[in-house]
Amino acid sequence: MRALPSLAIQATTVLAALLPARAARALDPFEIQVYDGTADAAGAAGVEAHVNGVVDGLRAAPPPEVPPNHTVHFTLEPSYGVRAYWELGAYLQTALRPDGSYDFAGVKLRSKLVTPSGWRPSLRLGINTEVSYLPARYEADRWGGELRPIVAWENHRFLFAFNPILDISLTGGIPSFEPAAMAVVKIRDELSLGLEYYAGFGPLDAPAALHDQQQILYQVVNLLAVRGLEVNLGVGEGLTPASNGLTVKAIVGYGLDWFARPAHIPPAPPPGPEVSGARLRRRRRVVGRRYARRMAMATRAISLQRFRRSRALRAPAPMPVRARVELWLPSGH
């Protein structure tokens, strides 16, 4: 009976070795961004332009997809704040291939929910859901979706964010795990430097081997010098053979808050009996009388002191007492 666990382990090992390795799905090349748990204000709109170019990338891809090497990806992302905690957005994607042809590369719709401002001093949570349609040359399954939880922590000096993304094929199959993370240090109010990490580990039920996973690390610079304008610049290097070797990216975003609705401010509570007008006036009278009494007492004390001092100066000086002492001695001595 003791040999059964060992036999089961051996059988599992042999079966795993016979199964073909499953490669990780390609990372999304049109949106290279880590969500930090913020959203457009209620009634405000925003627009972002994403541009990235694969300087040195993979030269082969599973058909009918095209290899990403020397491809430039463009994405236009408008967004709108429905509520202070709810944002809607869309993506219009295009690509410039190495041969000079310009392709339509699909559309996406998304909905993002985040915790309200002030929920916690530094912690923010959220979740983003997407549905997408891409041409077969950029996504073999065409119809897909994304479920992106958001965890972020920020103070006056640092910003950390983590997105454990699930990439879902709407045509069937097991979701793929594609985590993304960010660590940023703020140099000034207008400048921050940091790292962004993106990975594709493959299906949840059978993660890809390390050499088949996509893992890319970006060194990024964030600029906030102009009000409402955000710029993100980065250079990414592949960490595994299945990753693009070198990618450069830029994101330019601008917030349109012309129609933003002001945050709701609850009305102040009515004054209670302790701060009513009559009591307040009565309190002022009491305080005024006490102050007047103390001022009168202080004035009398000062006047009395001055009177005694002046009296002492006017009093005549006492006459000196002179005494004459004679010593009388009887004669004969």
Image (cartoon, rainbow, N blue to C red):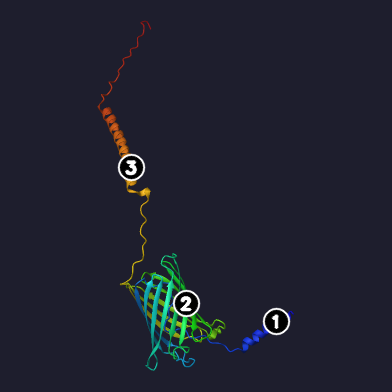
Residue lying farthest bottom?
A: 99
For label 3, the SS is helix
Based on the displayed image, in which of its 4 quarters is residue 157 positioned? bottom left
State left or right for residue 25 relative to residue 90: right
Q: Amino acid at mark 2?
A: Arg
Q: Is residue 273 above or below residue 97?
A: above
Label 2 SS? strand
According to the image, label 1 marks what residue?
6
Q: Residue at the top extreme?
A: 332
Q: Nearer the viewer, residue 22 or 269?
A: 269
Q: Position of residue 176 (x, y in %)?
A: 51, 82
Measure how far apart labels 3 and 2 are at the Cα level.
63 Å
- Tag on residue 287? 3
Of mark 3 and mark 2, the one earlier in the sequence is: 2
Residue 66 horizontal/vertical position (percent)? 45, 92
Q: Using the image, determine if residue 190 lies above or below residue 284.
A: below
> In the rendered structure, which amino acid carries the disc numbered 3?
Val
Q: Nearer the viewer, mark 1 or mark 3?
A: 3
Q: Secondary structure at mark 1?
A: helix
